Image (cartoon, rainbow, N blue to C red):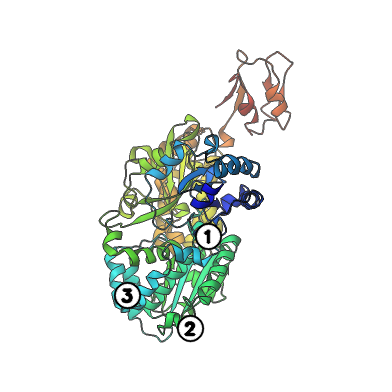
Amino acid sequence: MSEVNNGGVEIKVCMGTGGMAAGGEAVLKAFKTGLEEKGVAASFKQCSSGKVGCRGFCAKDVLVDVTVNGEKTTYQYVKPEMVERILTEHVIGGNPVADWEVGEDYRTFHGKQAELVLSDCGKVDPEDIDSYIARGGYTAIKKVLASAPEETIDLIKRSGLRGRGGAGFPTGVKWEAGRKSQGAHKYIICNADEGDPGAFMDRSVMEGNPHAVIEGMVIAAYSVGASEGYVYIRAEYPLAVDRLRIALDAAGQRGYLGKNILGSGLDFHIKVKLGAGAFVCGEETALIASIEGERGMPRAKPPFPVTSGLWGKPTVINNVETLSNIPYIINKGADWFAAMGTEKSKGTKVFALTGKVRNTGLIEVPMGIPLREIIFEIGGGIENGKKFKAVQIGGPSGGCIPEQHLDVNVDYESLTRLGAIVGSGGMIALDEDDCMVDVARYFLNFTQSESCGKCVPCRIGTKRLLEILERITRGEGREGDIELLENLSNDIKLGSLCGLGQTAPNPVLSTLKYFRHEYEAHIFEKTCPAKACKALITFGILEEFCKGCGACLRACPNAAITGEKKKPHKINQELCIKCGSCFDVCKFKAVTKR
């Protein structure tokens, strides 16, 4: 016991959305109760409560770091009932519980990453400002306030930081334009309206390290001469909203926010505006309209927000990840940041890696890393031994990259040349069982329903695109549909008012480019090569393999399967709803899908 107390015990429990969903709250409570009962003086050091944000490898939650006498051990899949043994054998006995430690896949997952924005997520208590300060938080503000605003803008320009919200516009150039804009009242807006399916980058940063976002906003305000800021965040992120508000209150109490910040004469206040979950409000002018109390619909540009934005005043808008980079760049220098990445895409990028890979979660990689390394090293390859097919990058506005381009470098220019985009950071791996026509239909269904309806090309064009795709996946495709999809997609891109419509056809165009044969099979052969489109699938039973075990009969929800015990069964095609339950439960490979 004395040895433990001399060295200290540090425990950090993942309490991001993923960690809490897996039972993080109960795990943290079990550790605190157990430490108290056993009389162990736990020193949580830079994380006074033991609570941290997302650790990245969400598939392993609840993840827990236990550090005894400076030696850290990470445990995975931790449940409250496991805590007693960890405390007894590891914290008191000095012997980590090897059975529950993370394995080689955890080390591989983190091995190729380059954490910058995520460097403090999973290490600081997001609800304790002292935890952030202990790791160097708010030192960047002090450096900036001691220099001229133009010097900070020049530093950000030299760093090469580009907007991480999707467009990739140079951040320093935007700040410079905001600085030069005429007006006594200017605004800084943090765009936290993350709406891409499968994306959780900004949410995780807000949940794990909200003070970095606040510090970035204050630095931006000083640089452009703004006195008021907004964080526009969707109401569907309650944990992120709560932690942001706690952080704002703490920053104000410590003098990092509000009137006369740190005695510099800078006045800057931040308000939180909750969005209703409209995807189009990720577009900056639609976001501005929403803050103003109007319906979230884009406006024609120019004028751009840096000259006429919120309530007609100069407004600089950056997303969560962009602003989170700022304190680190100020503290470590422009050259340090510019040394990472490629010539035109500097620094790192956070991605939400999901889909058919073995290792799913939040990752941060240097710009320019080959896509193959992300999928097969960080992601651990495709699960269940399936064959890799494509990666959908950039959310509904992005495109699909096929196997032949797996060695492409992940940066703005390289992905654009292939018909995809970096976007805000969604990355979904697809395997041989995914139908690319259906993938395009899925994303078109999303963008069509999220269209604000203001302009005809987007409102009507995406509707027509979706109707054609739905018809093709039902086996009702017609000759000329492929050409119609291409022509209509190009018209929508050229004629739409904002980025939603201009990029909505990307999933269609990229799948047509690389998987045209799948469209042709659907239209001319009335088959789905991936056997994913229900209308084009037929399930059958091979008599020579069927053992008559009855598993398929019991699994069928519509009584479409008949047969006697130990005799071959049959499927009534008129009753079959093509759910695939029979295929999934058959152990003898007697059920076919074609």
CA distance separating discs 3 and 1: 34 Å
Amino acid carrying mark 3 in the image: Glu
- Residue 446 in view, yes or no: yes
Badge 1 local density, few (<14 within 10 Å), some, or many (20+)?
many
Residue 234 sits above or below residue 177 on the image: above
What is the number of the mark on residue 259?
2
Residue at 41% from the left image edge and 36% from the top image edge: 517
Question: Which residue is the site of mark 1?
Answer: 125
Secondary structure at badge 1 equals loop
Q: Where does the image place residue 184, in percent across and percent down from the top left?
A: 41, 87
Res 555 quadrant in image: top right
What is the number of the mark on residue 176?
3
Q: Where does the image place residue 381, in percent across and percent down from the top left?
A: 43, 36
Frontmost residue, 441 versus 61: 61
Badge 2 local density, few (<14 within 10 Å), some, or many (20+)?
some
Res 552 quadrant in image: top right
Frontmost residue, 377 versus 304: 377
Among the two numbered marks 3 and 1 on one chain, the one whose residue lies closer to the N terminus: 1
Badge 3 local density, few (<14 within 10 Å), some, or many (20+)?
many
The reply to whether callout 2 and callout 3 are in contact (CB within 8 Å) is no
Q: Where does the image place residue 382, in percent across and percent down from the top left?
A: 46, 35
Foreground tag (3 vs 1): 1
The reply to whether callout 1 and callout 2 are in contact (CB within 8 Å) is no
Frontmost residue, 68 versus 224: 68
